[in-house]
Amino acid sequence: MIPKIRTGTGGTYGLIRYLFGPGKRDEHTDQHVVASWNDFAPDPGRNPHHTVAQLAAQLDQPVKAIGDRAPDTTIWHCSVRTDPDDRHLDDNDWTTIARRIVHATGIAPNGDTTACRWIAVRHADDHIHIAATLVRQDGRHANLSFDKRKAQAEARRIENDYGLRRLTPGDGTAAKTPTSQERFKAERTGRTETPRETLREAIRQALAGAADEEEFFTRLREAGLRVKLRQAPSGDVLGYNVALPGDRNRDNEPIWFAGSTLAPDLSLPRIRRRLTDGPVDTAAPRTGSDRSAPARHRRDAAAIADRATTVLDDDGDDEAAAQLVGAGELLDALAQTSPTATRTELRDAARVFERATRSHVRAENADIRALRSAARGIVHAGSALGRGEDGGATAMVLSTLVLLTLAAARWHSARGHAQQAAASRQAADHLVAAYQQAATTPMRAMREAGRALPASERHRHETTIRTALGEPDNRTGTAGRGRHDALAATLAEAEKAGHDPKALLQEATSGRELDTARSNDDVLVWRIRRIADLPSTPYRSDKPKTDSTRVKPAPGRAGTRAEVRAPTLSTSDLHCPTPRR
């Protein structure tokens, strides 16, 4: 059940006329009063002798009685809507619900005969509108302290009492949602989202890894936004406003949004506190590497994100909350530089995870420079390709971020942050879908390489893997055959590079989060390739090898190098859920 409160000025006539009218977007049917302050309010919907003007006059009477002493805001309007899947509520149910809402918010406490005047109008099966005036009948102004929070809390109790769908309770740290007018305007102008949502995402992307305030504002302008700074007489910047080009009001003026109205943590003071954790160069220069800059920085980000995941389980609340802020910047950086195949899912992941970065646990005095540096490196390295080393490095960092968002969900759940925990899980789902897109080609190549290993070498590595994971030995059966092909290929490649496969696997399995991983093999493959600094595609030797999976070249075909039969890739090969469509 969703209560939505708005306030206004002037008389109630315009609002009442709309509630009893035909409707502008949804057709109004059987418009009638289901409850009122005295149970005898005029009902223009069902009594032909009653008019909208009569009802509005009675509602406005306390406001007009005090004349110039009336408050600036005189109208209180609350719509209360059930979920489409909820059961049908009749007029008696809505009458009780309306009375509970006005009591909880202080509009008309039970037993208070001189409270505000109000009515509840029903013109559809799934919702009612409560209209009230904000001057009490005894002439005092209404007390609306925390009315929205109180309405939400009462809605949660109503859901429980009536067996309705229970929504996740908020904690007052969410960003402001677009208004109905903003959404209608976006539809009329052909936008897929409101300017408020577009601006919020653009500001977060401009902030990702920014070194200082000047760079932040420069990025905003380079993104095509209008930027207006609020300055004191001394010239000091006090705040900022942003607007989308072409987004204008009826007077043809730009529609400006202050950062603080887009999200609580996008005010200039909050941004300045984050910028004090300036990015630092944490990665040593890689000499002789033929990897692209996007690939290098994604590998560095995977290692940093892995450490942040550990912090969410081990350290205090302040430090963990800071890691979530840094992780949000990392996601914003990846969303704007990701390959086309993963861009949509990463943008969705970054958008929903921004809710997980805000709670009442403040990230004070915590160092997130490593995460901010990783975000900065990714932004400055530019867009990554979806293939080769770039594609593999993208899969590597996404595999780590899936575990980080799941750890964030556990951290929030343990502290009762229901909305943030839900947002973390949604982000993990988007990241899994993006990972599947990025990892398909490199994982297929690694599975092929594992199947091409000599039987004795493959068996030796599979034995090491089963021992490390505590799996039974299936050497005489077919169960699980081929399951560890990619991991076996990775261990074989690491061994050729001079590493001890057992030690590498032990180090990789000692890391956290394997219990929540959707594919242990995938996580271990990328951890080992990162630890051992292996390329994202398997090492290919030119030396011919004999193996049951190899086939002879077709007669008359040039070359003598044997070929590997390419297997058909299926969802089960990935050991993770079916990709979302």
Image: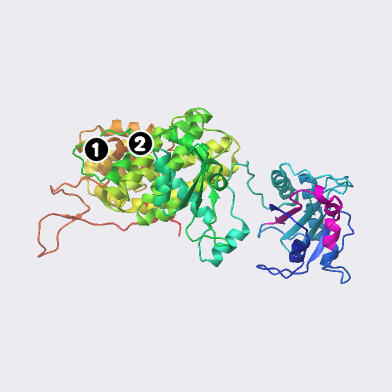
User: Which residue is at 47% across, 47% downward?
Assistant: 203
Task: State how far apart marks 1 and 2 are (Cα).
Answer: 18 Å
At label 2, the amino acid type is Ala
Q: Is residue 117 left or right of residue 459?
A: right
Q: Secondary structure at mark 2?
A: helix
Tag count: 2
Q: Which residues are magenta?
A: 55-82
Can you identify the residue that label 2 sits on?
A: 303
Q: Is residue 294 left or right of residue 64?
A: left
Decide: is 318 above or below 434: above
Camera-side residue: 248 or 129?
Answer: 248
User: Which residue is at 49% across, 56% downward?
Assistant: 244
User: Which residue is at 44% across, 52% downward?
Assistant: 347
Please state the horizontal and vertical placement of residue 528, each as a whole percent of the image. 31, 38
Q: Is residue 138 left or right of residue 11?
A: right
At label 1, the amino acid type is Ala
Please state the horizontal and vertical placement of residue 511, each as a whole percent of the image. 39, 33
Asked whether residue 553 is in view, the answer is yes
Is 65 colored magenta in this rendering?
A: yes
Is 272 colored magenta in this rendering?
A: no
Q: Residues within 10 Å of mark 2 (few under 14, many from 20)?
A: some
Q: Is residue 12 left or right of residue 231?
A: right
Can you identify the residue that label 1 sits on?
A: 494
Q: Which badge, 1 or 2, comes first in the chain's sequence?
A: 2
Q: Quadrant of residue 580?
A: bottom left
Please state the horizontal and vertical placement of residue 337, each as a whole percent of the image. 36, 50
Please state the horizontal and vertical placement of residue 373, each as a whole percent of the image. 37, 37
Looking at the rendering, in which quadrant would you find the C terminus?
A: bottom left
Q: Residues within 10 Å of mark 1 (few under 14, many from 20)?
A: many
